[in-house]
Each structure stands twice: as C-alpha cells, then as structure tokens.
Amino acid sequence: GENVEQHPSTLSVQEGDSAVIKCTYSDSASNYFPWYKQELGKGPQLIIDIRSNVGEKKDQRIAVTLNKTAKHFSLHITETQPEDSAVYFCAASYTGTYKYIFGTGTRLKVLA
Amino acid sequence: AAGVIQSPRHLIKEKRETATLKCYPIPRHDTVYWYQQGPGQDPQFLISFYEKMQSDKGSIPDRFSAQQFSDYHSELNMSSLELGDSALYFCASSVKLVPDTQYFGPGTRLTVL
C-alpha cells in the first residue's frame, strides 16, 4: 500500500544553520506533496507544498524540492530560528482521493 | 482569516461510552477529512466527505461513523469507546477548486478512561 518514509526522526541545529528533512513515497500516482508544521497541542499548519509538475518551490526561508524519478522530496529551512522548533510532517496524495498519507514526522529543535 | 473549528477541544469519556466530535470547515469549503493522531505518531486518515457524500474511507473502526450536513459541518460519532481510542482527532477542510490542499483544525483531544 501507500507509504511515506521520513528522515530524520529528530534533528537539532544551531540557530542560523540550515535544516533538511527528506521523505520518500511509494505510490508513483502521488502528485501533491504538502509539508506541515505541528506545534505541541496544535493542529498541523501548512507551510509549503509542491505538485508533481514542479521540481522546486521556495517561500522565503523555506523551500521544497521534488525528484519524481527517485520518488523523494525534501524540505529545506535556511537561517533557522528558535520558533522553527516543532514537529514537521511530509505527506503525499493523488488526484481522485486527496487523502493524505503522512510521513512519521521529524522533531526539529533549533538551539539558540 | 477563518479557520477550521472543532468542538469540543477536550473530551473525557469512560470505556464503552459514546462520543461525538464536531467539525466546522472554513467557509465555502465543501470537503471535510477526519484524521486520528496517537501520541508521538503521524495523523492517520479515517474518512472524508465531499458535498455531504462519503468520498473516501481509511482505517476507521466499524464502531465509528461520520456524516456531513447540509451546512457542510461534519460530525464523527464514536461508540463503545476503548482505551486505544484515546488520541487527537483532527478535522481538515478543502475547497473544490484546490481539493488537495487541506487546512487542519486545532483538534479534539479524546481521553478514554
């Protein structure tokens, strides 16, 4: 069945450094890949997304890259700040169902 | 901007009791999704509705049922609650023009004692 693997499970970086989180999906029909940030006790918040017809997308300090051939996509956060500390989830879905298959999450800790 | 509203935010029930969770999607959103998130886990898809019809079904137990009403709000009914049902339950909504982009509510934390 559909599966999304996410690495690493935890990531600690110094403030100002970059953070990279990687996900691999199994279903080649997947064509939409959102990233969510979840703070403790809150719902997932959409931070960036990418569709399968695009290889890269950037929004200020956040960027996402997609490699359809290898079936993996990555989240890049530059100039990290303490408020970036949270759990980040990748997800995959495809036209027709739109339900999300989530990765297992990455706990990012930005050290001041 | 208006967000997804879920109620109640916290719910404590005994085993074998029944619980009803409510979700009010973002205005003009016509699709609702329900997810269950256990402690330290990723959200798992339960069920979705588009225009008041069930559109997809995931790992939802037979003890659970859901529906979407004419005003697009949705309710998740959970019966014969078990200890393992303790989790965060999220509702998300999307709009027909961009059906794949889901916006999540703050969640309902259900504790079964």
Image (cartoon, coloured by chain):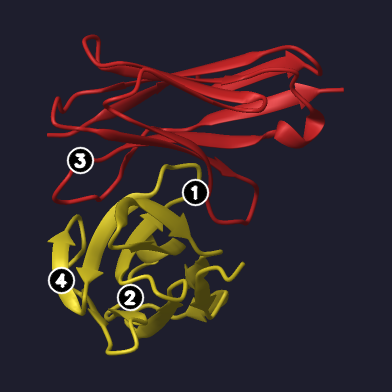
Q: Position of residue B95 (x, y in %)?
A: 34, 63
Identity of the residue drawn at 87% across and 22% down: A112
Whole-number angstrom distance, CA of label 1 to CA of label 2: 17 Å
| Total numbered badges shown on the rendered structure | 4
Q: Is residue B62 visible?
A: no
- Residue type, label 3: Tyr
Q: Is residue A57 visible?
A: yes
Where residue B24 sits, quadrant-wise, is bottom left
Pointer 4 and pointer 3: residues touching (CB < 8 Å)? no
Where residue A25 sits, quadrant-wise, is top left
Whole-number angstrom distance, CA of label 4 to CA of label 1: 27 Å
Residue topped by disc 3: A94
- Residue type, label 1: Pro
Q: Which mark is residue B81?
A: 2
Choose mark 3 or mark 1, whichever is in front.
3
Does B14 sit above or below residue B95?
Answer: below
Query: Which comes before the other along the chain, label 4 or label 1?
Result: 1
Chain A colour? red
Pointer 3 and pointer 2: residues touching (CB < 8 Å)? no
Q: Are marks 3 and 1 on the same chain?
A: no
Choose mark 4 or mark 1, whichever is in front.
4
Chain B colour? yellow
Identity of the residue drawn at 37% across and 58% down: B36
- Residue type, label 2: Leu
Identity of the residue drawn at 61% across and 56% down: A42
Whole-number angstrom distance, CA of label 3 to CA of label 2: 32 Å
Q: Are marks 4 and 3 on the same chain?
A: no
